[in-house]
Amino acid sequence: MDFFDYVSDSLDLISDSDRLKICRELEVAAAEEILAFYQYRAVSPYLVGRERANIEEFFNDTAKDELDDHFAKLLNRMNELQYVPTRIFDFANIQSTAECEYHTPENVSELIPILEQNIESEECAIRHYQRIIDLSRDLGDYTTEQLVKEIQTDEYDHLSGLNDFLADLRS
């Protein structure tokens, strides 16, 4: 059995309505990953202050992870589940599709509020991914469950890094 036979066989185990429930959650997560990418990448060259260089590097690495890894994996999984995420095709819909809020930085020279905003976003992403993990497990979609667990682990790593920077700046 090759990969495509496995994917096809596993799709037969999930009802169309259950697959739609999972894919709608994945689409929301994909919108959130786009916002996370932007939240990290848009401010990174403008940061100032102590630890700026390290935080900028962390933000750029994390932005790449959010877009090139998480977002891509979510799109691939939706494609495997034969779902077309039309809500995120129009960039104007991305923020309204996402459940986690995009935080507009007020002042890039204040690192602590920016870190706190990103911490809030990562915590929201972790909660949303847990909901997808639970839904996938309950509906018998173990492939999506495993994929989302991997992404959630990355989000915990991002959260840890942000908390470390915040602790350093507060000390």
Image (spheres, helix red, strand yellow):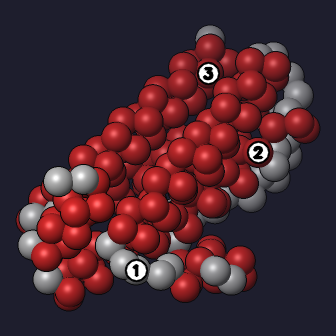
Q: CA distance from mark 1 to mark 2?
A: 28 Å
| Circle 1: residue type | Tyr
Residue at 64% from the left image edge and 60% from the top image edge: 35
Q: Which residue is mark 2?
A: 41
Q: Is residue 146 left or right of residue 163?
A: left
Q: Nearer the viewer, mark 3 or mark 2?
A: 2
Residue at 58% from the left image edge and 40% from the top image edge: 65
| Circle 2: residue type | Arg
* Numbered label attached to residue 165: 3
| Circle 3: residue type | Phe
Residue at 62% from the left image edge and 14% from the top image edge: 168
Q: Quadrant of residue 4?
A: bottom left
Q: Describe the element under mark 3 as helix, strand or loop.
A: helix
Closest to the observer, 81 or 47: 81
The quarter of the rendered structure image containing the N terminus is: bottom left
Q: Is residue 106 left or right of residue 70?
A: right
Q: Which residue is mark 1?
A: 83
Which percent across, then down, holds residue 24? 37, 78
Marks 3 and 2 close (CB-CB < 8 Å): no
Q: Nearer the viewer, mark 3 or mark 1?
A: 1
Q: How many neighbours does mark 3 have within 10 angstroms: few (below 14), some (14-19), or many (20 or more)?
A: some
Closest to the observer, 71 or 36: 71
Of all residues, the one furthest to the front in this rendering is 1
Closest to the observer, 53 or 112: 53
